[in-house]
Each structure stands twice: as structure tokens, then as C-alpha cells.
Image (cartoon, rainbow, N blue to C red):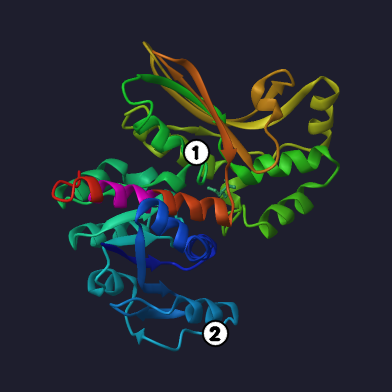
Amino acid sequence: MTQKITIIGFGTVGQGLCEILAGKKKELLEKYNYRYSIVAVCDPRFGTVYNAAGLDMERVIAELRADQKFTTDRYPWDALETIRNSNADVVCELAFTDLKTGEPAMSHCRTAFETGKHIVTSNKGPAALAYAEMKALAGQHNVDFRIEGTVMSGTPVLNLAEGPLAGCSISAVKGILNGTTNYMLSEMEQGLDYTAALEKAQSLGYAEADPTGDVEGYDARAKVTILANVVLGEKLSIDAVDCTGITALTAADIMAAKAENTRWKLIGSITRSKEGLTAYVRPERVPLTHPLAGIMGATNALTLTTDLLGDVTIVGAGAGKTETGFSILSDLLAIHRTETILPDNRL
Ligand code: HSE
């Protein structure tokens, strides 16, 4: 069976995904018997294109690179009409993240579920603000809500907790969850000033469209909320996570930490104890001997405290075009695997 894909929002992640799919087409077929067809792309800047038999993605990407509106297979549809009207099996929701309302992504997800389509997304809005609702609605319609790319890009932390670590009880997670700020802190230690470090992180595609979300800690707070819901099974709301970003940290603070064999890191943490749940994002001075101190650049790391294995730490990419594009591919393949193995009982 060919998996039919609609892409909503054709920015960095969507383009990263398409490059991977095109480059690995043969390998994906040979190794996993995976065939795909991109049937629709909808982007506010370039327009909507749809072809039930599959778009000519070389043309779509060439037009996008030339910064011109799509010309062929055009439809006058907005995102919701594209989701409703396309014949896709899976909608890749890759529109911008809004952590206040979750929109328009939340409406995109609801429409996909209600029309029997899976959602694969790296958008933190729906998962951080309405995980339980999204999961329940997907379940009612016998489709999936897959969100690996919302935390640590393609580094498989959510799938690790839900798959290989199933059977363990996870009582705490702690780590570095934002690539932009970790990159900035690393660069500032090398002597770059705050503004130049942020500009570099933006040019490398790590930062959010509005980087306030990174430097104020809101992006990490959304990830902490998602981890609490998915990995710890807690109904934590985003407002309950204490949050301080890195904006108050000066070059002098960073150098002072270095002189004392410590390093500032923006830490996200959740702990479940008898007293209840504690969740926060804040800069902490970590001794250089601590494993998190060695995590530099846009790399992320997370330690999961389990009852059966003790601490398990996963380290990997936290942001980036290919890295997040891969998170989408891994979820697409997971849906393909499930449907291949259990064609009549997807969930
Ligand atoms: N802006 C985010 C980061 C992107 O820097 O980690 C990945 O979620």
C-alpha cells in the first residue's frame, strides 16, 4: 500500500522531510517495503497544490526555492479544506507553533482526526496544550496522533519511553531540551556575544520563528509539559511549569561559572514524589564533572529515572532541518509498520 501524505506548512521541517524521502526512496522501499506519495501541500506563502495520484515534488520544491507561488495542480483551498478534501492517509502538521492558543495547528489536528486521517507533527502547540484531547479524539476515529518531533527533534525519546521502556515506571526526567539556548551558551563561552550567538542559531535553523520562545524558556516549558503527559502519564498543564529562560545570563556570568569549573545549562525537569509533581525550566550551574555539562551546541540530552533500569540517558540532536525531518519520517514509518502488521486493528 502506498502511504498518501498531505503536508500542512511547508517550512524548514517539511522541506527537510521531502529531501529525506526523495533521497531515501529506494532504501525505504527495499528495507521496509515503504511507498509514499505526497498528494497535497498547503502553505500560506506558496498556496495549495493537490493531486490525488501524487504531486510532482521536484516542481513543487523548485518553485519554492525560486520563492514563487505554486503553479501546477493549484486549488483555492485553505489548510482545513486541504485536510478535508485530500485523499491522504496521514497529515503532516508542520505549521508554526503557537504556545498560547495552539492554533491553527489544533484545528488542523481535529479536522484530520474527524476525517479519518493520522496526524504526524513536530508542532508543540497541540501536544503541550491539549495532549489528552488530541489522543482521545484520534482514538475515537481509529487513527494515530504521533508527536516524536515535538521533543528533541528526531532523537527518539518519546518512542523510547512508549516502546522499549514500556513496563518501567518513570518517576523523573531531567535534561537539556532546547537546542537554540544550548548552542548560544556554548558559543558565548567561546566569546561570542548574546545577539551574535542568537543570530547564528537562527541562521542554522535551530530557533523558533519567534526566538523569544527559545530564550525565555517557553519552548523548553512546552517540552517539559509534553514529557509529563506522555512519559510520566501526568495531566500537567503548561502554566504549572515554573519557567525562567537565559535572557538574564551575561557573558560575565558564563565566564565566572567557567572559572569555577561549572557551566550554565538551561535545564528542564519533572519529578514525581510523595509530595506531588515538581516541574520547572531554569538555568542551572552544572559541575563540569556532571554528564549534562558536556552536552554542547544544539545537542539535547535527557535522563529518565526508571524503577527497573535506574537512570537511562539519551543524547542526540535537539533541533535542525534534517533532524526534525527525520522525526516525521520515523513516525510515518511507525504508522506504516502498524498498518502492515495489523491492517484491521490500527490502534
Ligand atoms: N527551537 C527549538 C530548539 C527547535 O531550539 O530546540 C526544536 O524544538
| Residue 131 in picture, x, y percent from top left | 31, 43
Magenta part of the protein: which range?
A: 331-339
| Residue 259 in picture, x, y percent from top left | 86, 23
Residue 174, placed above or below residue 19: above
Whole-number angstrom distance, CA of label 1 to CA of label 2: 36 Å
Q: Is residue 118 magenta?
A: no
| In this picture, residue 51 sits left or right of residue 64 | left
The N terminus sits in image quarter: bottom left
| Residue 66 in picture, x, y percent from top left | 60, 82
| Amino acid under disc 2 | Gln
| In this picture, residue 161 sits left or right of residue 256 | left
Q: Residue furthest top?
A: 274
Mark closest to the chain's N terminus, 1 or 2: 2
Front residue (pair 164, 257): 164
Could you say whether the residue bearing mark 2 is in a helix, strand or loop?
loop
Q: Is residue 336 magenta?
A: yes
Question: What is the quadrant of residue 111 in the picture?
Answer: bottom left
Instruction: Say if residue 67 shows up in the picture.
Output: yes
| In this picture, residue 222 sits left or right of residue 109 | right
Residue 120, placed above or below residue 300: below
The disc placed on residue 194 is none
The C terminus sits in image quarter: top left
Magenta span: predominant SS is helix
Q: Residues within 10 Å of mark 2 (few under 14, many from 20)?
A: few
The disc placed on residue 221 is 1
Residue plotted at (72% across, 44% down): 184
Q: Are marks 1 and 2 in contact (CB under 8 Å)?
A: no
Question: What is the quadrant of residue 85 in the picture?
Answer: bottom left
| Residue 285 in picture, x, y percent from top left | 70, 24
The residue singled out by tag 2 in the image is 68
Question: What is the quadrant of residue 252 in the picture?
Answer: top right
